[in-house]
């Protein structure tokens, strides 16, 4: 069974803070993704990575950066959190182009 | 126009009912299609892939209509446990670029 864990389920931060969200997977999957999910908008891809130290921008990368130093770990960084980054953040992994497996999500509130 | 569009619902149906959801996609080059299920405050999980010939998994049937660019999900004999949001997902170029619909919420009532 694939296990994808995220560092926090709930997070409250202040505007301007630097925020780190971590995702860890235990299945040796090549691909890892960060999405945000907002009501009425569905999941939108922020960044993805297909290998260690490799990253590709998704649809909404502005205000975010990522880091993948090890295969099992993919971090999302909000350089300077803003209120419009309040959202549910979901990490996912996949092997090839098959099923994506999601972590439990992090609900981030930026005040 | 959104790349993947779904009726947001909510669909409220009694136990035992048959319910169908449609999803339309805008890019005719789309290659693969999926339905995911997301329970309240949980992560999405794959329900089923959608094949050109249509496919069935127990009470669930998925169909693809490439000419009209839509996919459908039919749930027969609805159970209370089917209550969830159903996400339509389209992979345009058979790569990692999955496009998610906003989801259709289903509530099955006793």
Image: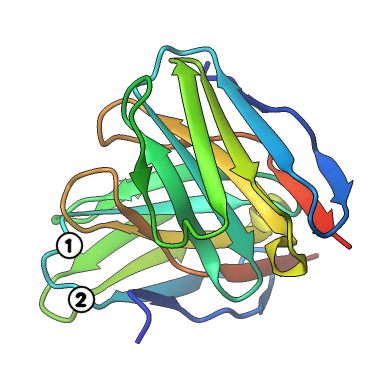
Residue B95 is left or right of residue A3, and the answer is left
The foreground one among B67 and B3 is B3
Position of the N terminus of chain B by quadrant: bottom left
Q: For mark 1, what is the residue?
A: B30
Q: Is residue B74 above or below residue A34?
A: below
Contact (CB < 8 A) between labels 2 and 1?
A: yes
Position of the C terminus of chain B by quadrant: bottom right
Residue A3 is left or right of residue B15, and the answer is left
- How many numbered marks appear? 2
Residue B45's disc is none
Q: For mark 2, what is the residue?
A: B69
Q: How is the image coloured?
A: rainbow
- Quarter of the image where one finds residue B62: bottom left
Q: Is residue A48 above or below residue B92?
A: above
Residue B88 is left or right of residue B12, and the answer is left
Badge 1: few (under 14), some or many (20 or more) residues near its Cα, within 10 Å? some
The foreground one among A58 and A91 is A58
**In this rendering, does residue A111 appear at all?**
yes
Q: What residue is at 50 percent from the left and 30 percent from the top? A: A67
The spot of residue A55 in percent (x, y) is: 36, 36
The spot of residue A91 in percent (x, y) is: 56, 38
The spot of residue B60 in percent (x, y) is: 43, 53
Query: Quick one: SS at disc 1?
Result: loop
């Amino acid at each position: 069974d694939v296990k994808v864990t995220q560092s926090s389920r709930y997070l409250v931060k202040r505007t301007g803070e630097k925020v780190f969200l971590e995702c860890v997977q235990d299945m040796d999957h090549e691909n890892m993704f960060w999405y945000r999910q907002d009501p009425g908008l569905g999941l939108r891809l922020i960044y993805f990575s297909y290998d260690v130290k490799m990253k590709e921008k998704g649809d909404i990368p502005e205000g975010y950066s990522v880091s993948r130093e090890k295969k099992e770990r993919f971090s999302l960084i909000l350089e300077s959190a803003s209120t419009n980054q309040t959202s549910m953040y979901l990490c996912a992994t996949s092997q090839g182009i098959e099923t994506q497996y999601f972590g439990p999500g992090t609900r981030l509130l930026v005040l | 126009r959104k790349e993947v569009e779904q009726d947001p619902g909510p669909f409220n149906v009694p136990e035992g009912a048959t319910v169908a959801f449609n999803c339309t996609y805008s890019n005719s080059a789309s290659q693969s299609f999926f339905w995911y299920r997301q329970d309240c405050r949980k992560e999405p999980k794959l329900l089923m892939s959608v094949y050109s010939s249509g496919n069935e998994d127990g009470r669930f049937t998925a169909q693809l209509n490439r000419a009209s660019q839509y996919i459908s999900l039919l749930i027969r004999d609805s159970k209370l446990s089917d209550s969830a949001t159903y996400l339509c997902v389209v992979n345009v170029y058979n790569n990692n670029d999955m496009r998610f619909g906003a989801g259709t919420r289903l509530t099955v009532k006793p």
